[in-house]
Image: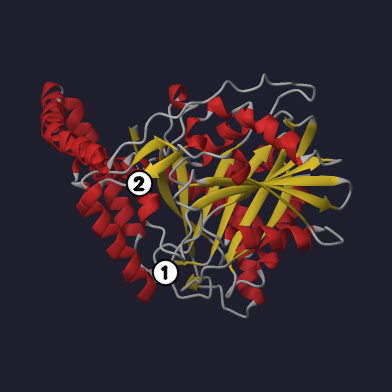
């Protein structure tokens, strides 16, 4: 057994039938599609490297502690690997519709929290694989690490058949409760040790506390409500999804011409896409700022290969009121430079660490109460989420077929009707756009605006 971390557990308690907390991707492969049995065999050979794929979440009685991962004694790989096909003509519209339908369904908590869908019928002699895992299992970085593990680096790879797997005995509720009580007894001692370490290095502790206070203050300033707009409000349980694509070299050329980072250019073109979306809806944009939650990985190098959540966050204001693309890019560059010195990331880590010190029953009750309140009174402080995760810059294969595209999906929550996930793979960058089904029938405008924004900046760079 292994206990979930505070952030891992929070993703379980944020889920409420409307806010679905799974992350996902749609990988497109060169055809012809393999047989179902061939994909199952290829995945079976890799399961030993990813224990989470054969584990279930077990909740502790009376929520005395965070849930634990335990082996699933009834694990059946063929339950998790599904097989379907697109209707003709199998183009982008059909793929978008299928992805939205699959993302509208929550994962079954009685089983390991993942699914993989083999998709036949894509036009151009291609096939797809939609992968869906609960956010409590992994963040974006560990999700791409997982991708590299489950796929092959060579087209002719033949992984050895998996050894027979024998699950560990399932813990009883009495065992779970007893372990939780032991953890509660040990917790005060661990807190005492933490205080003792602080007292042994008071100078460093004072500096860290000052930086933490700066970060919390920066957070507080960013939580002022933004101007009302149609991208903020209640959501339903169903999702839409689309994507935009670009060449990584084009984004690097923009960076070389105008300075900053590739991520600055990405946020600038997303801001331009939101501007086009709002203008298309007839909304005035001169006073609107779209505030985005920007997850930031705090995963250390030695933590790669572990499957959990190691993220903090920044809050960036996307300048949709700015018409000129170069001014918009300059605004983002300055803001991101300022945010890097604001210690917001440290504040996010500190707030997550409080989950280790707070009795879990209080955390769970608080998160449920917050979600219930947001269903009735949507928040207006965070308008969207933009998460950017670098992927492998070399081709990957499944059952001997090359993966051509890797298109990401990000979940949305109460008050946030649109989110954008960005992932790079083998020289390409994909922007996966998630929308609430009932309120974002026009998210293609955002996706097209992103591609047009890249083309415009690239033209100005020459």
Helix, strand or loop at disc 1? Answer: loop
> Residue at the spot x=83%, y=58% of the render?
90
Residue at mark 2: 9
Q: Residue furthest bottom?
A: 282
Q: Position of residue 62 (x, y in %)?
A: 21, 51
Task: Report the side of 433 relative to 70 (left or right).
Answer: right
Q: Which mark is residue 226?
A: 1
Mark 1: few/some/many CA within 10 Å (<14, 14-19, 20+): some
Label count reads: 2
Q: Secondary structure at mark 2?
A: helix
Horizontal arrangement in the rendering, residue 377 relative to residue 17 (left or right):
left
- Above or below, 246 relative to 42: below
Residue 35: x and y in percent read 79, 39
Screen quadrant of the C terminus: top right
For the N terminus, give its image quadrant: top left
Near-viewer residue (72 or 20): 72
Between discs 1 and 2, the one toward the N terminus: 2
Indicate which label's residue lies in the foreground, 1 or 2.
2
Q: Is residue 319 visible?
A: yes
| Crowd class of label 2 (few under 14; some 14 to 19; many from 20; radius 10 Å) | many
Task: Identify the mark at residue 137; answer none if there is no mark.
Answer: none
Residue 443 vs 348, above or below: the answer is: below
Q: Residue at x 35, y 55 (%)?
A: 13
Say if 278 sits above or below 60 in the image: below
365, 384: nearer the viewer: 365
Residue located at (44% from left, 73% from top): 227
The quadrant holding residue 164 is top right
Residue 139, position in %: x, y? Answer: 48, 41
- Marks 1 and 2 sit apart, C-alpha to C-alpha, by 29 Å
Figure colour scheme: secondary structure
Does residue 265 appear anywhere in the picture?
no
Q: Nearer the viewer, residue 220 or 48?
A: 48
């Amino acid at each position: 057994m292994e206990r979930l971390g505070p952030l891992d557990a929070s993703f379980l308690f944020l889920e409420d039938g409307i806010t679905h907390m799974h992350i996902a991707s749609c990988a497109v492969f060169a055809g012809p599609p393999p047989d179902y049995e061939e994909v199952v065999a290829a995945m079976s050979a890799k399961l030993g490297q990813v224990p989470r794929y054969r584990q279930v979440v077990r909740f502790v009685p009376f929520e005395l502690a965070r849930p634990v991962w335990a082996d699933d004694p009834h694990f059946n790989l063929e339950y998790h690997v599904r097989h379907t096909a697109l209707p003709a003509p199998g183009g982008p519209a059909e793929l978008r519709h299928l992805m939205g339908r699959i993302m509208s369904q929550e994962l079954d908590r009685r089983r390991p929290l993942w699914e993989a869908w083999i998709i036949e019928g894509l036009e151009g002699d291609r096939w797809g694989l939609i992968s869906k895992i609960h956010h409590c299992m992994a963040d974006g970085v560990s999700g791409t690490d997982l991708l590299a593990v489950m796929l092959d680096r060579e087209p002719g790879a033949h992984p050895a058949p998996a050894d027979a797997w024998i699950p560990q005995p399932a813990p009883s509720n009495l065992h779970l409760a007893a372990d939780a009580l032991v953890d509660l007894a040990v917790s005060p001692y661990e807190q005492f040790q933490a205080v003792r370490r602080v007292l042994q290095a008071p100078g460093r502790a004072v500096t860290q506390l000052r930086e933490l206070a700066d970060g919390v203050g920066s957070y507080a300033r960013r939580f002022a409500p933004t101007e009302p707009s149609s991208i903020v409000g209640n959501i339903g349980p169903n999702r839409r999804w689309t994507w935009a694509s670009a060449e990584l070299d084009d984004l690097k050329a923009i960076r070389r011409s105008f300075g900053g980072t590739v991520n600055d250019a990405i946020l600038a073109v997303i801001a331009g896409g939101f501007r086009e979306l709002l203008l298309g809806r007839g909304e005035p944009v001169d006073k609107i700022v779209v505030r985005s939650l920007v997850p930031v990985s705090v995963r250390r190098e030695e933590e790669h290969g572990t499957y959990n959540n190691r993220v903090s966050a920044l809050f960036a204001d996307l300048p949709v009121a700015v018409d000129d693309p170069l001014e918009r890019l300059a605004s983002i560059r300055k803001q991101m430079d300022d945010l890097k010195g604001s210690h917001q990331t440290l504040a996010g880590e500190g707030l997550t660490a409080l989950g280790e010190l707070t009795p879990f029953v209080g955390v769970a009750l608080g998160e449920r109460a917050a979600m219930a309140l947001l269903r009735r009174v949507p928040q207006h402080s965070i308008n969207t989420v933009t998460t950017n995760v670098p992927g492998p810059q070399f081709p990957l294969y499944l059952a001997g077929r090359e993966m051509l595209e890797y298109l990401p999906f990000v979940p949305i929550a109460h008050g946030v009707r649109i989110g954008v996930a960005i992932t790079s793979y083998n020289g390409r960058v994909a922007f996966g756009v998630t929308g609430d089904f009932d309120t974002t029938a026009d998210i293609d405008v955002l996706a097209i605006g992103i591609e047009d924004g890249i083309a415009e900046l690239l033209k100005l760079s020459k």
